Amino acid sequence: MRKIATLSKPSGFLSPALVVATLTASSVASFAIDALSPVERFLGDGFDPDEYSDQNLDQQKRFAPTSPGDSDLGDQLILKRYQGRAPLRFDIATHLFWTDNVASTRSNEDDGVIWKTRAAASWKPRIGDNLFADFSITQSIYRYDSPSRLDFERTDGRVGLVKIVPEFFDMLFFARYEYARVTSGSLSDGIYNSHRLRVGAHKVFLSTPKHTAYVALDYAYDLNTKPSRLERDEYSAHLGYTYQITDDLKAVFFYHLALYDYDQAGRDDVNQVAGAELYWQLNRSARVHASLLYAENDSNLSDGAADYSAFQGGLGLGMTFNF
């Protein structure tokens, strides 16, 4: 990838890692929501395949629990009279992560602990034949054990449409408007906001009681971003596989690939995240899970200013309610 220089050199030029370490709290947070960032791997974690699953979008596909007779009977699909789906979904979760590169720098890597708390509400009412409206608002809070100046909060909202097309390879398509706002240590201290449009497609190509696999593609266009140097086009691909170990325990494996094409200075970044998660459903609402992922960002900025790699692992607890 061709490297470009976009950062002016102050007198007594510092390496990118030292620049990060010496920025003020406000500018560090501004740095953090860029792909130069300690938190880019979190800002890209908004893709949730469960939101576009058959079950969540009222397809009423329910497999019977596994049993010793499955080898003789095959997969047993439960058919029931349509009762209507409770369209309101509320989710709250808290996670504690360890990472070997808390500041996401290419050199002088330090490990650390990050605490994330997330609350989300979504509503997907049916408005037509296999057509759903999509409303969502999410608030996430990130706290670092050190340095605390990296603490930030993110607010997300979206309005869009979701369309299932059974006659076209059983594909799902979506289009939506998204708003994102990032604050630094306080919900009133805004350092970033963006308005964007996103379109995409989702395909489940394997669905059995034990195995589920999907592929998804999406494109996002920034309508307006502050600071403007962070405006970009985003091209993303997602692969995922779920193995249902028992009725209450499942393993999830995923890979995300994104190309960030920035409007200014000819900057391009390639961002990759690969990971595995283990979910244990305690009851109808509560769950615990463990996760391990690897994130890598490769940019054409000079001196590797936006390049990083990091391992991250953690434990989480969450609850989901449908009304």
Image: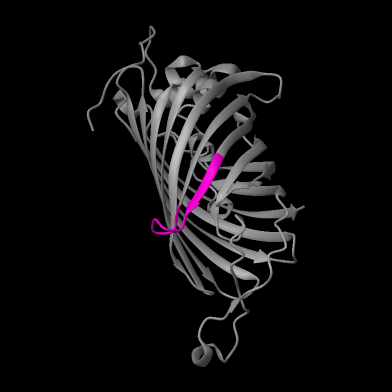
Q: Where is 223 relative to 313, above or below?
A: above
For the point 61% across and 63% down, the residue is: 279
164 falls in the magenta region: yes
Residue closest to the eye, 37 or 98? 37
For the point 43% across and 21% down, the residue is: 231
Task: Work out which residue is located at the far front of the displayed protein and give it.
Answer: 129
Q: Where is 319 relative to 80, above or below?
A: above
Q: Is residue 219 visible?
A: yes
Q: How many marks?
A: 0
Measured as percent of width and height from the top left, residue 17 is found at 43, 27
Measured as percent of width and height from the top left, residue 172 is found at 47, 51
Give the magenta range. Answer: 161-171
Residue closest to the eye, 91 or 17? 91
Along the horizontal axis of the image, is 266 left or right of 248? left
Task: Work out which residue is located at the far left of the displayed protein and give it.
Answer: 2
Measured as percent of width and height from the top left, residue 44 is found at 49, 39
